[in-house]
Amino acid sequence: MDLYEVMRTTFSARKFTDEPIPDEVLHRILDNARFASSGANHQGWRVIVVRDPDTRQTLGNLCKPAFSYYKAQLKAGEVPFNTVTPSQVDRAVGEKEPHGYPLLDNFHDVSKLPVLLVVVLDLSVVTAFDAHLPRIGVISGASIYPFVWNILLAARNEGFGGVLTTFLSDKEIEAQRALGIPKHYAVAAMLPLGKPVKQLTKLTRNPVSSFTTIDSFNGPRFDIE
């Protein structure tokens, strides 16, 4: 596929057919994704292909409370898990809301979820220039999320799809225990992959002029019209 077509049609797929992803295709996806950039080229990522049904369902169950709370916050008009504006939703109450994500109940079933990847990052090789700032860190993500997105782009190029989820990080300690992940590895993403039930080709995004300015944050908008 054309690169720009892949970029414009890679969407968050959450419903899949029962078509499997052959090992050679999954290997090709990862073989191309590995050329993503990372700080000092340390390539501190590790990928776990989760196949055991019980382990898969354990991970799905770990995600349910966070997803329920997420939905409760959305219902209250909040930005979920936001670090700038504190939530007014009681977490214990929010976690009792229906999670509304059927796939979480079917993580064990390869006919509904052909491939499940967990991507982790070795924090001992990551540079974080914002570690001293009084806010949540974001810089270390530059050493893992280009790789994660490359996986999704490569999957789209192969005719498959998936979604970048981060709910598992809410229960990182339990996930580390379930998958034997060392403590200095952060759970960066969990990627369900498969053949989308419906392939979207027209995605809606804001125009360049809505997020690009010249010389300063409040400078004139960058546009060609």
Image (spheres, helix red, strand yellow):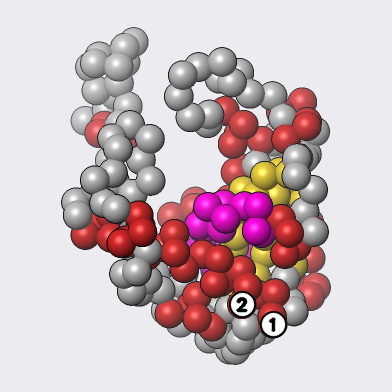
* Residue that lies at the very extreme toward the top in this rendered image: 215
Could you tell me residue 137's position as x and y percent?
53, 29
Q: Is residue 221 left or right of residue 49?
A: left
Image quadrant assignment for residue 207 = top left
Q: Which residues are magenta?
A: 155-175
Q: Tell me the residue that label 1 is attached to.
A: 53
Q: Amino acid at mark 2?
A: Gln
Q: Nearer the viewer, residue 144 or 66?
A: 66
Q: Which residue is mark 2?
A: 57
Q: Judge by depth and name the residue closer to the eye, 177 or 7.
A: 177
Residue displayed at 77% across by 53% down: 181
Where does the image place residue 11, in percent across and percent down from the top left? 44, 62
Q: Quadrant of residue 108?
A: bottom right
Residue density around tag 2, few if under 14, some if 14–19, many if 20 or more, within 10 Å: some
Instruction: Give the CA separation, mark 1 to mark 2.
Output: 6 Å
Pinpoint residue 167: horizontal percent, then vertical percent: 50, 57
